[in-house]
């Protein structure tokens, strides 16, 4: 004879069979109150306000772009001004100033390559 039986719960608590099933762990149930409705409306209003601010910002950028000249003209002017000023770090002569340095960039003249 099996003497294993479950102890009865204290008075006022439902038995295991009588408890409603709990929701899955990834699903949280919030009680429906007036505050949740207010917070939902507030969040929605904040999101709409944020989107309106982004629209205003983008509209201002578009207005600024319309007043600028064409980018190709600006780029051509920039390139011509940069090309007209010599670079202080580059030598003015077109040829090599030191022939011994030039051999490192040309490579070996022999068919066989030498490794140092």
Image (tube, grey):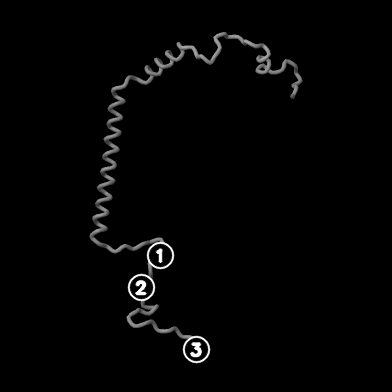
Is residue 31 toward the left or the right of residue 27 in the image? left
| Tally of numbered tags | 3
Is the Cβ of the residue at disc 1 closer than 8 Å to that at disc 2?
no
Labelled disc at residue 100: none
Q: Which of marks 3 and 1 is nearer the N terminus?
A: 3
* Image coordinates for residue 51, horizontal then vertical, percent: 29, 41
Report crowding for label 1: few under 14, some 14 to 19, many 20 or more residues within 10 A (C-alpha). few
Is the Cβ of the residue at disc 3 closer than 8 Å to that at disc 2?
no
Question: Which SS class for mark 1?
Answer: loop
Is residue 35 toward the left or the right of residue 102 in the image? left
Check the image and report above or below for 26 versus 59: below
Q: Mark 2 points at which residue?
A: 20
Is residue 116 toward the left or the right of residue 67 in the image? right
Residue at image location 28% in from the left, 32% down from the top: 59
* Image coordinates for residue 67, horizontal then vertical, percent: 28, 22
* Image coordinates for residue 111, horizontal then vertical, percent: 75, 18
Q: Mark 3 points at which residue?
A: 3
Q: Mark 1 points at which residue?
A: 24
Q: Quadrant of residue 53?
A: top left
C-alpha gap between disc 3 and disc 2: 28 Å
C-alpha gap between disc 3 and disc 1: 34 Å
Q: Nearer the viewer, residue 1 or 13?
A: 13
């Amino acid at each position: 004879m099996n003497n294993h039986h479950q102890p009865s719960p204290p008075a006022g608590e439902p038995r295991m069979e009588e408890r409603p099933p709990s929701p899955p762990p990834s699903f949280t149930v919030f009680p429906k109150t007036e505050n949740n409705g207010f917070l939902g409306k507030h969040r929605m209003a904040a999101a709409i306000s944020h989107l309106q601010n982004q629209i205003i910002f983008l509209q201002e950028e578009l207005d600024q772009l319309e007043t600028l000249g064409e980018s190709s003209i600006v780029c051509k002017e920039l390139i011509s001004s940069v090309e007209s000023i010599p670079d202080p770090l580059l030598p003015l002569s077109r040829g090599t100033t030191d022939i011994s340095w030039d051999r490192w960039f040309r490579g070996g003249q022999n068919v066989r390559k030498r490794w140092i």
